[in-house]
């Protein structure tokens, strides 16, 4: 039978392991993030100005995904009047527009 103390120590070790995996994944995602807040990016059907990069970590699979929260822009590179927010995933970016 495993003691309560041993179970607590194992839980602490497991939590520490998960925290360290998350730190590594976040570090890699930040290192591989080519765009900054304020950049105007385009995927296959929409254009947006980056408000914030969003990183999601899957600790079990040891992977991360990166997408950008953006204000939706028109083809003339001006924001829509509604100010709609969109997501553009890093893997879907096809073009970066130069800042005006």
Image (spheres, helix red, strand yellow):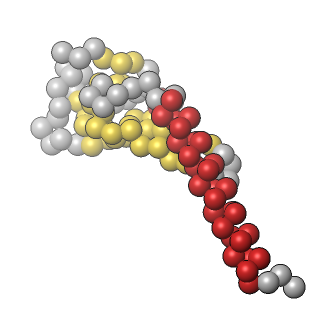
Q: Is residue 34 visible?
A: yes
Picture coordinates of residue 85, whole percent (x, y): 27, 43
Asked if 59 appears above or below 68 in the picture, the reply is: below
Q: Is residue 65 visible?
A: no
Residue at the left extreme?
A: 81
- The answer to whether 44 appears left or right of 23 in the picture is left
Count of numbered badges drawn on the protein: 0
Picture coordinates of residue 97, whole percent (x, y): 30, 17
Residue at the right extreme?
A: 1
Picture coordinates of residue 99, whole percent (x, y): 23, 17
Q: Residue at x 38, y 38 (%)?
A: 53
Asked if 68 appears above or below 20 in the picture, the reply is: above
- The foreground one among 94 and 34 is 34
Quadrant of the snapshot with the N terminus: bottom right
- The answer to whether 22 appears left or right of 80 in the picture is right
Quadrant of the snapshot with the C terminus: top left
Q: Residue at x 53, y 38 (%)?
A: 27
Q: Residue at x 71, y 71 (%)?
A: 9
* Quadrant of the image occupied by residue 46: top left
């Amino acid at each position: 039978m495993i003691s309560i103390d041993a179970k607590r120590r194992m839980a602490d070790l497991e939590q520490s392991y998960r925290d360290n995996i998350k730190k590594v994944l976040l570090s890699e995602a930040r290192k591989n993030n080519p765009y900054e807040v304020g950049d105007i990016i385009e995927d296959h059907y929409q254009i947006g100005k980056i408000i914030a990069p969003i990183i999601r970590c899957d600790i079990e699979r040891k992977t991360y995904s990166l997408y950008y929260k953006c204000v939706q822009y028109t083809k003339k590179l001006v924001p829509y009047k509604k100010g709609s927010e969109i997501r553009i995933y890093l893997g879907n970016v096809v073009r970066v527009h130069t800042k005006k």
